Image: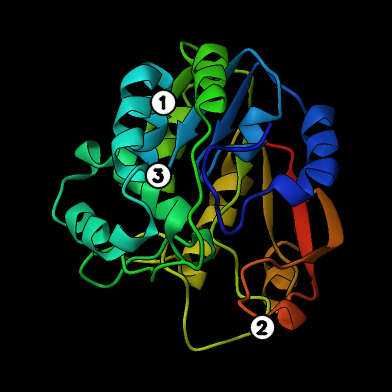
Amino acid sequence: MNSYLQWAGSKQNLLKELVPILTKHKKKILAEPFIGAANVSLNFSTDRYIWNDLNSDLYYTHKKILENPDEYIRECKSYFDRGLEDYLAIRDEFNSMEPKDRTALFQYLNKHGFNGLCRYNSKGKFNVPKGSSAGTYNEHLIQDVSSMFGGIVDIYNLGFEDIFEIIEKEEDVLVYCDPPYVPAVPSGSEVKYTTDGFTEQDQIKLKQRCLDSKHICVISNHWTDFTKELYKDADEIYTYDVRRTISCKGSERLPVKECIVVYLGK
């Protein structure tokens, strides 16, 4: 099942490697501190889910779809009917609103912005430029997700350290962490999925949270010199060649290594 959002860093292309690892360690609850577009949960069957993301637009979009898909679809239609030519005006409208009120606009920007990127400037304003073509939303998929997952998902809008405090109070949980990746090639910039971004220090804190957890924790990331050192104490390490899909040049979408590491819990 594909997500209703286009998402840089989506795990759709890694599912064939990731799902067997998650299945090996399956529990009654799957917790995702970085839910993103929810591709993993949508393709992994269990009794209950904990979804979390610090990105408020993701949080309110998932929440609206799970709880009120009909209203969400009606709101989407009013924006998608305006086409690509209104992208900048709709982006300005989006940036003037509170996250809970702009979920349909978020869908529009996601399907009309450059490469489906989600990026904010230092003031918290969405600043992705217009894409080259207009996308659409999938009414049937939105309804299916709501009917399949509504009522079995607890959803939060917290930092990863706060959601781990909640997760640790639960029993029979498998935690899957898909943080913003360490750059495959060192650069002076980072893609900001939230206003503050995600630093190397955050990567270290997340690893320590997983190491200290009573639950089995799985993390995915790029396999770099930094992550090789960071995850050297993992109980299981898997590496894969994957193709990056966010470069604007097709010739630059070259294989890089990703890793999936497992900490088996205290």
What's the CA distance linking mark 3 and mark 2? 30 Å
- 232 or 58: nearer the eye? 58
Please, is residue 120 above or below residue 68 in the view? Answer: below
| Picture quadrant where residue 240 is located | bottom right
Q: Residue furthest bottom?
A: 188
Quadrant position of the C terminus in the picture: top right
Write down the residue under mark 3. Answer: 107
Question: Residue sitting at 38 percent across and 68 percent down?
Answer: 128
How much space separates mark 1 and mark 2, taking CA atoms?
A: 36 Å
* Residue 52 versus residue 147 in the image, above or below: below
Q: Label 1 to label 3, Cα distance in Å? A: 11 Å
**Closer to viewer: mark 3 or mark 2:** 3
Crowd class of label 2 (few under 14; some 14 to 19; many from 20; radius 10 Å) = few
Q: Residue at x 62, y 51 (%)?
A: 10
Question: Residue 68 appears in which quarter of the rendering?
Answer: top left
Q: Earlier in the sequence, mark 1 or mark 2?
A: 1
Q: Percent from the top left, x then y, of residue 156?
A: 37, 32
- Which mark is in front, 1 or 2? 1
Q: Is residue 54 visible?
A: no
Secondary element type, mark 2: loop
* Left or right, residue 248 beside residue 257: left
Q: Write the residue at 33% across / 62% down.
A: 85
Q: Amino acid at mark 1?
A: Ile
Which is more foreground, mark 1 or mark 3? Answer: 3
Going 38% across and 71% down the picture, which residue do you hit? 129
Image quarter hosting the N terminus: top right
As displayed, is residue 137 above or below residue 198? above
- Kindly identify the amino acid type of the residue bearing the numbered disc 3: Gln
* Residue picked out by circle 2: 185
The residue where tag 1 is placed is 65
**Quadrant of res 204:** bottom right
Residue 232 visible in the shown view? yes
